[in-house]
Amino acid sequence: SPVLYNCEPQHKMIAREKWDCEASPVAFMKAGNRTTANHDHRDAGTFQLFYKGMLSVDAGGGYQFYGTDAHASQLSTLAHNGVLIRYPDAADANSGTYGGQRGMGESLTKEQWLSRSCYDTGIPEGVSYAEKDGVCDYAYVASDISPAYNKETELDYLSRRMLAVFTHDAKMPLIYATFDSIVAKGEDGKKVILLHTRPGTKIEGNPVIARNENANLVASYVSPSELELNFYGDAEYTEENKDTWCGVEVSPKLGNLRDDVLALMYAKDLDCEYAPTIKEIKTDDILGAEIDSYALLFVRSLPECPAALSIDTESATTYMISGLSEGKWSATVGDKSISFEVSKTERFARIELPAGKLVLKK
C-alpha cells in the first residue's frame, strides 16, 4: 500500500502517490495523539513534503549536538512545519523553543505513561484516505493539538487539519493544504505558521516559492488576507548551500483571539510554467479554496457542524470536505444530487459533482 497510518499513539500518516515511480510525491503528516518523550520531537501537527527530493522537511540535526542548545532547538516545534504561539513576556522568549510545544520528562514505566495526561499531544479529529490498486488519491489527518501546548497560558484551542491530494497530473502532481483554527489566550499572542524550505526561496508578495534541485513548492496563504511573511536564510540557491535549511514565518495580524489560517501549496517540476488560479471560498461556516478542478473545503466549527452548508464554485468538479459531522448527507449542484455517509472516525468526504452552487444537507 502507498499509505501507512499509525493510529495510536501518534495519529500520523505517510502517503505517496504510488510505489512504481521514484518521482512520486510523498506527504508525511503527524497530527498528534500521545508522545513517548525520549526521542520524540515536539512536533504534533507538523508535516514534511517530498517531490523529486526534499521540498519542505524539518530542520534536522545529528547527535553531535546532543545536550546542547542546538539539540534542544532541533527537538522543538521551531524546527518543524508547525505552529507557534508567541507572547512578548514569555519565559522562553530568548530561546530556540520560543512559542512552541511543551517539553516533558520521561515516564519510568508503561503504567505511568498510560495514566498521565501530560503525554497527551492531540485529540484526533479525523482521518481518511483513498487508494486503489497501489495508487493513492488523497490522504487526510486532523487533530486538536492544543494539549501539546501550555493551555493555561498560551491558547484555548488549536486544530490543525492536513490534506494531501495526489492529482495524477504531471504538471501539478501534488496539492497540499493546512487549515489551522487557533484561539489564543490573549490578543497579544502572535500566531506563527512555519514552513521550512531550501535556499533560494522567494516571497513574491504571497505566494512563497520554494525549491529543491528538481522541483518547486508554491505555497499560497489564502486566508486571512492580512498576513506578515518573513523569510530567514540564504536568498540564493547554490551548490555550496543547497543542503542547508531556511524558513518562512507567516503570522496573522495581532489583535484577534481567534484566527483561521488556510495555506494551499502545490508541487511542480522546476521548469514547469503552469500556474493555476487559486480562488478563496469563504462563508461563515466554511473556509476553503478552488484550484484547478478541486475545491478543498474546511468546516470552521469543530466538533460541531451545521446541518446545512453551501458554497459557490467556478471550475471544481471534485469536492473534498473536512469537518463534516457523522451521519447521512446529501449534496446538490443544480439538478444533480448524490447521497453519502460520513463516519465518526473520518469526518471527511470526497464527492464528484459539477461546478456551481453546492448545497450540503444532513
Image: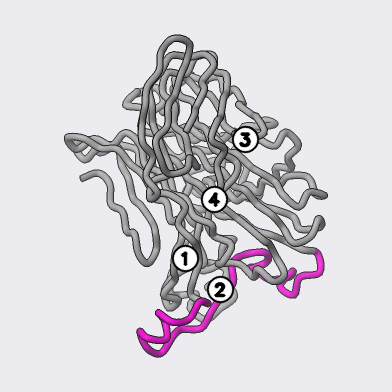
| Label drawn at residue 133 | none
Considering the numbered disc 1 on the image, is that residue within a helix, a strand or a loop? Answer: loop
Residue shown at 50% from the left, 75% from the top: 65
| 73 on left or right of 16 | right
The quarter of the displayed image where residue 12 is located: bottom left
Q: Which residue is mark 2?
A: 72
Mark 1–mark 4 distance (CA, rounded to whole Å) = 37 Å
Of marks 3 and 4, which one's residue comes earlier in the chain?
3
Task: Check if residue 100 falls in the magenta segment.
Answer: yes
Q: Which residue is mark 4?
A: 303
Residue count near mark 2 (Cα–Cα under 10 Å), binned few <14, some 14–19, many ≥20? some
| 136 on left or right of 122 | left
Q: Name the amino acid type tagged 2.
A: Ala
Label pair 2/4, CB-CB below 8 angstroms:
no
Q: Name the amino acid type tagged 4.
A: Pro
Q: Which residue is mark 1?
A: 61
Q: Is residue 118 visible?
A: yes
Mark 2–mark 3 distance (CA, rounded to whole Å) = 40 Å
Q: Position of residue 32 (x, y in %)?
A: 46, 61
Of marks 2 and 4, which one's residue comes earlier in the chain?
2
Q: Main secondary structure of the magenta part?
A: loop
Residue shown at 44% from the left, 31% from the top: 320
Of marks 2 and 3, which one's residue comes earlier in the chain?
2
